[in-house]
Image (cartoon, coloured by chain):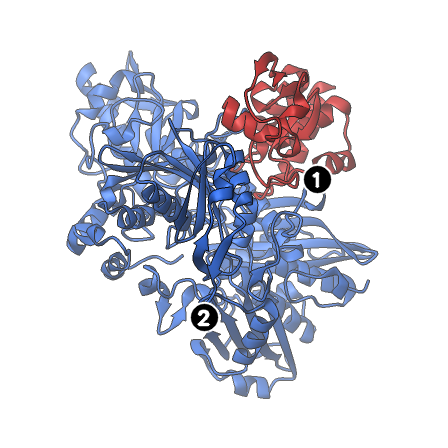
Amino acid sequence: MKFTLNGSERTVEADGNMPLLWALRDVVGLTGTKFGCGAALCGACTVHVDGAPVRSCQTALSDVEGKSVTTIEGVGGEVGTAVVAAWRKLDVVQCGYCQSGQIMSAVGLLSENRKPTDADIDAAMDGNVCRCATYQRIRAAIHEAASNLA
Amino acid sequence: MHIIKPADYARMLERLAPAPALAAPSRRGFLKAAAAVSGALVIGVRLGPSEAFAAAPTDGPMPNAFVKIAPDSTVTVLIKHLDMGQGVTTGLATIVAEEMDADWSQMRAAFAPADAQLYNNLAFGPVQGTGGSTSVANSWDQLRKAGGAARQMLVAAAAEKWKVPADSITIEKGTLKSGSHTASFGELAADAARQPIPAEVKLKDPKDFKLIGTRLPRLDSADKTDGKAVYALDIRRPGMLTAVIKRPERFGATVKSFDAAAAKQVPGVVDVVAVPAGVAVLAQNTWAALQGREALTTVEWDESNAENRGTAELLDAYKKLADTAGRSAAKRGDAAKGIAGAAKVIETEFAFPYLAHAPMEPLNCVIEKTADGVTIHTGSQFQTIEQAVTAGIMGLKPEQVKIETVWAGGSFGRRATTTADYVAEAATILKAIDGRAPVHLVWTREDDIKGGYYRPMFYHKVRAGVTADGRIAGWEQSIVGQSFMIGTPFEAFAVKEGVDGTSVEGASDTHYDIGNLMVELHSPQVKVPTLWWRSVGHTHTAHVVEVTIDELARAAGRDPVEFRLELLKDKPRHTGVLKLLAEKANWGTRPGTGKGRGIALHESFNTVVGSVIDVSVVNGQIKVDKVVCAVDCGIAVNPDVIAAQIEGGVGFGLGAALHDEITLDKGVVEQANFDTYIPLRMSEMPKVEVHIVPSANAPTGIGEPGVPGVAPALSNAIFDATGQRLRSLPFRLEDFKA
């Protein structure tokens, strides 16, 4: 299976039915994308496919053939850099396990909408569970990143 | 958790079955080691870096067991606790940095190896482990002395090198100075490590603290925002096989027979073995293992010892028990007589469901054979127990079980079990395949939600009354719920005269001055494995006490804050919190039309937290608008980490108040994943404000105390808004008429 991964062409030898999550983690060896539920219920496995956030646990490897996949390890650019900087400035993380997915969803939101309201944030981020409940700081960090992008 | 008395050590050690070798050094040996650690000098127990420290991020000499100084001047603090998100790596490093007068930018943290003599939790006795919100509290003196000793050894080295008196040397932000001489920690590290260990360590006067009490960036923010942080799920070892276990539907069932043929045909599946927990499928990757487990359809279970009761039957049984005399947990005055003479009496009941912890990182660990034993890689919360249990399974001595502790993706208590459950499972699989490959045991979310070790179901029945002049006339409380301490190594200190302290804490020892009090406990046996869950007994006792206090205040026609203040006359920490809270939450004002405001105050883990919640009720829907908390946790080592723990605790408590519930139907768990075991999500998170009461006392717990007050403050706020009282958890919107 050939696709672009974090900007580089990759060929991954694996069953096309294998979820992208396990292909990334177990075959490619990029472990920043996390397994949380295996059923698109928690968002911990969020990556970008052609720039849009998807749940990699419900995306077959064959679905990304010829496409561009970005994982937490490949976050960059204006929006990605602003989001990560805001996360660090506000010390959003606690256990940190869901934060790869939170950041991928937040980058997706801010790439589409540079000035999200609280309601926009609820809509974009409700699929990302944080059992440490860092939600207040995630919201603040998204607003912080938005103000730095303005 | 409670502080363990030395007299309980030996009994605990004996119960650390199945590992007699652990007790072998003798009780005296352990006490000596513990005394050395808790006494003035930790220092010198190990002077040089040993093999066990090889995994630490920077190498350099170690002035003592907790501090390592590298030639590049980075100071690595060996963290004996698990960081599961509560921020102890930052907190413990702050304590050392303060006493060393280090610059925050030079501080690093590394998880300490498993070593119960060097790295035991001083609140747990001879056990290395994390829980009971004890990490900072039990380390406070220990790490101040470790940091202070390292500082004195650096100063002594500089004095020798520069030929100046030691008292002419100052340290500021990691630089030593005397006259025209200056040096970094790194330049002096090797010389400092050769200095004699100071006989006495001079600690700073808290008024001279420069780092403690300020906002310092977390040490883990960078690695947890770029995918670099390594959790157990990210461990990769050469030739490692991933294992998942097909488990029975009912607790207590065992494998009778199985046919592995179909599973073995799945590409990538390497082996299928029976273990005590079920049938393990081993494969070259996680996806293959999961598919192999799917294919494992012909497993027969022996359910002759399985739990077959459902939640409704258990609750019925609990209600009947509550009407009978239980074991006495508290008895003061004459509660029945007081209530008989009361002007107003309330009789209430509260039911609490089983709760799964559901940390974001599903339970997992890697275990592999080494030349002289095994190594376990996991977010280890109970190193000593895991060593003992694994040693028993593998036929090793505990010291042959090495543990590499890594970041844990949440825990909320789940990773600390007295059976070392998932680590033991991994060990049984490794044993079943004769140790031929490293084994990565992975639980799926369904395994986690259905897998037990829940906060027990509880049922409380309360009868209480107020006198005509508005005082509490009497209080009777009957508590029913499983004990997770009886039959474990912790029984000796947790269970007194048949009463498990963790079932009644927060009620039997209520901080309110109630003259006529009776609290009784029943601990029924159910085959559902249960466990502490963030804030333990306080998860239910605080709710019952704080709702009841609110109901009594209203019955007496009193303001809930004034009513509490009167019952807390000799409790300055409690009244301090309550007064700050009332001020910050504008208690004297009304929150607005269609809104309600409720309050709760509770002490847990030696920390007092007050919570005021504002709610709106729109079309029968409860919306939590705002939560204001005040906290007294002693000296605030890292105020921002404290705020984060309270914010998170509020969210965790709200999830339990609004959604969390594990139910059983004929013994089978009815929830499976986050669609049925509902987590709190972004749109439900209120604004949380945290106010810290200034204190000169030693730090107390912070990881858990934010949780207990949330549900009762919410119940009290909903009553304030609607006149309707919700008692049992989770609150049901269908019970609610706007």
Q: Chain of mark 2?
A: B
Q: Give neighbour class at mark 2: few <14, some 14-19, many 20+ (Cα, 10 Å).
A: few
Query: Which of the two discs, 2 and 1, sits closer to the camera?
Result: 2
Q: Where is mark 2, residue-wise?
A: B525
Q: In this orientation, does residue B208 appear? A: no
Chain at tag 1 = A
Chain coloured blue: B
Disc 2 marks a residue whose amino acid type is: Gln
Please give the name of the residue rendered at 39% of the width and 26% of the height, measured from the top-left corner.
B107
Tags 2 and 1 in contact by the CB under 8 Å rule?
no
Answer above or below: position of A21 versus B523.
Answer: above
Q: Quadrant of residue B196?
A: top left
Q: Are marks 2 and 1 on the same chain?
A: no
- Find disc 1 in the rendering and name its residue: A126
Say which of B81 and B424 sits in front.
Answer: B424
In the figure, B458 relative to A129: above or below? below
Numbered label attached to residue A64: none
Q: Give how far across and how far down residue B707 sits, in percent.
A: 56, 53
In the shown orientation, is residue B672 left or right of residue B365? right
State the separation of the CA atoms marked 2 and 1: 39 Å
Q: Position of residue B579 (x, y in %)?
A: 59, 56
Which kind of residue does numbered mark 1 sit on? Asp
Residue B68 located left or right of residue B338: left
Can the viewer see residue B714?
yes
* Chain A colour as displayed: red
Find numbered disc 1 in the image and state the secondary structure of the residue it sits on. loop
Q: Nearer the viewer, residue B427 or B281?
A: B281
Q: Residues within 10 Å of mark 1 (few under 14, many from 20)?
A: many
